[in-house]
Each structure stands twice: as C-alpha cells, then as structure tokens.
Image (cartoon, rainbow, N blue to C red):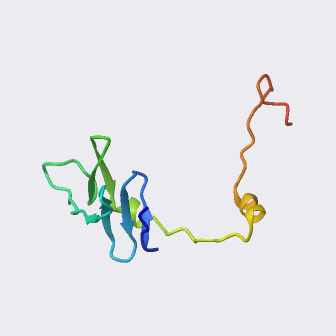
Amino acid sequence: MVKLPSEFVATKYPGYFWNTETQVLYSLKIDGVLKPLKIINPNRWNSWPMPGYRVSVKGRGRYLPIGYLKGLKPKPFHIASGHAAAIETIPVRETKKRGQDWRSHI
C-alpha cells in the first residue's frame, strides 16, 4: 500500500497525482515511485488551447490542462469516532424501485 503526503491530490485519471505545493503532475509507477511529468506548452504542431500534461489512460493519450489541475484542492481528512458516526457521514442515494412511477414522490 502506497501512502502519499497530504499535498498530493488525485486527478480524474487513475495513477496521476497533482502536487498542490510545487504545482507539478506526478505519475505513480508500479513499484511505488512518483515520477514528475513534463509540462507541454501549446505550439503550432498541437491544438491545445493552454499548457498541460499529456497522460496515457489504458493506452490512449489524454490531455490534462493546467486550469483543471490548479482547480484541484485537497479534501479535508476527517476521522469519525466509531462505526456509527462513519456511516452517518456517507451520503445515501435513494434508488427508484422497479415499477415505481417517477411522480410517486410528489
């Protein structure tokens, strides 16, 4: 199990973490090593509107713009006291039962 420092925030793609202090994107390798990635600036050979990072997700190239990454904030860590308190903090989504009309709750 790999534990990252609190300044690392997970991105929308698995295996990539944004460091909020140094403003650098890191890739988590299979042996647990964090590898910093290079930023790519827009130029006449690519069609990117702003600087960003090129990442690979399941073998397909993806683009993570700097604007999205700078908007990531670390989530506050909260330890609930006891199992009952932890259950209360989890939001529960109500599901529609089979055959139930969507207007039945009105």
Classify 78 as above or below 63.
Answer: below
Q: Is residue 38 left or right of residue 74?
A: left
Give the percent coordinates (x, y) of residue 7.
Answer: 43, 74
Residue drawn 79% across the image and 22% down it: 99
Please determine whether, in this image, residue 98 is positioned above or below residue 75. above
Q: Nearer the viewer, residue 6 or 105?
A: 6
Q: Is residue 94 toward the left or the right of residue 10 in the image?
A: right
User: For the view shown, which residue lies furthest in the left direction?
Assistant: 45
Give the total number of marks visible in the rendering: 0
Name which quarter of the figure residue 77 lies in. Answer: bottom right
Screen quadrant of the C terminus: top right
Residue 17 in which image quadrant: bottom left
| Residue 80, image x, y percentages | 70, 69
Q: Nearer the viewer, residue 66 or 49?
A: 66
Left or right relative to 20: residue 51: left
Residue at figure coordinates x 33%, y 72% from the top left: 23
Rendered image quadrant of residue 9: bottom left
